Amino acid sequence: MSLETKSRLTPTEMTRARILEAGMRCFAREGFAGATTRMIAAEAGVTLPVIAYHFGNKEGLHRACAQAIVEQYSRRLLPLVSAAREAANKGSLSATEARDWLDRILDALVKAITADAEQRLTTDFVLREMSEQGPGYALLFEGLWSPGIGLVADLLAIARQRRPGREEERAGAVMLITSLSAFTTIEPVSLAFLGWERLDGTRRDTVTALAKRLLDGLIGC
């Protein structure tokens, strides 16, 4: 949450936002099972009843974290994704145009995984949730993963001059998107192997270019 946004919040809203952020950190670090409300309360600097007042229980807080991520995704990527989905649904998109949309989506995804600390935190939460599937999993799947990967699959099919919906393009979309996990899920291993301190600047451009080369292979296969 930006400083400008925080400045407009009431004290009650600020407290809720602080708990949400602390919860996201704890869930990302410990997982849903490992994180406790006591741990989250200590990190947020509040008492347990305050968490109960705002979120009910740990499950409610976890779902609220997932919902906040879906909303953040909507603010950052929805205009691009909505425009691409509308173009794909018209049925008149050329193979070249579909490829252009895929390039723009890859650009946006690489920027998202290397963005500010807020984005990094949400990425860590999402990655943990992919493997553990806690209470917020369904919200993330229905509001984030399924529509996003589905869009990439449809655009990939159009770029290959095929009808969307085939299993091959759907699997290809999954493989393309998950290739970026090299700089999310296993980022410490990747950075250590490459001798990079972090992914920024020209290195981010390198990753984007390589992702597009993978896309070239999927389109040409």
Image (cartoon, rainbow, N blue to C red):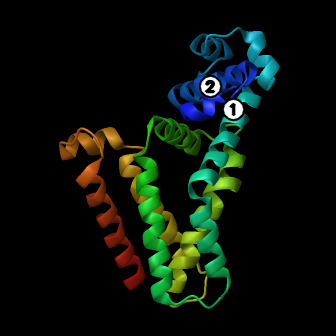
Query: Looking at the picture, does residue 172 appear above or below residue 56?
Result: below
Amino acid type, callout 2 = Gly
Residue placed at 70% from the left, 55% from the top? 142
Judging by the rendered image, the residue that carries numbered circle 2 is 23
Of residues 97 and 190, the one nearer the viewer is: 97
Regarding residue 191, the answer to whether it shows in the image is yes
Q: Residue tagged by mark 1?
A: 62
- Position above or below: 149 against 23: below
The residue under the point 58% across, 77% down is: 154
Q: Amino acid at mark 1?
A: His
Q: Is residue 128 left or right of residue 134?
A: left
| Residue 10 image offset from top left, x and y in percent | 73, 23
Q: Residue at x 57, y 14 (%)?
A: 43
Instruction: Check disc 2: other Cα within 10 Å, few if <14, some if 14-19, many if 20+.
Output: many
Quarter holding the N terminus is: top right
Q: How many marks?
A: 2
Is residue 168 among the parts visible in the rendering? no
Q: Quadrant of residue 47?
A: top right
| Picture coordinates of residue 118, whole percent (x, y) | 51, 36
Q: Position of residue 174 (x, y in %)?
A: 51, 64
Disc 2/disc 1 C-alpha distance (Å): 7 Å
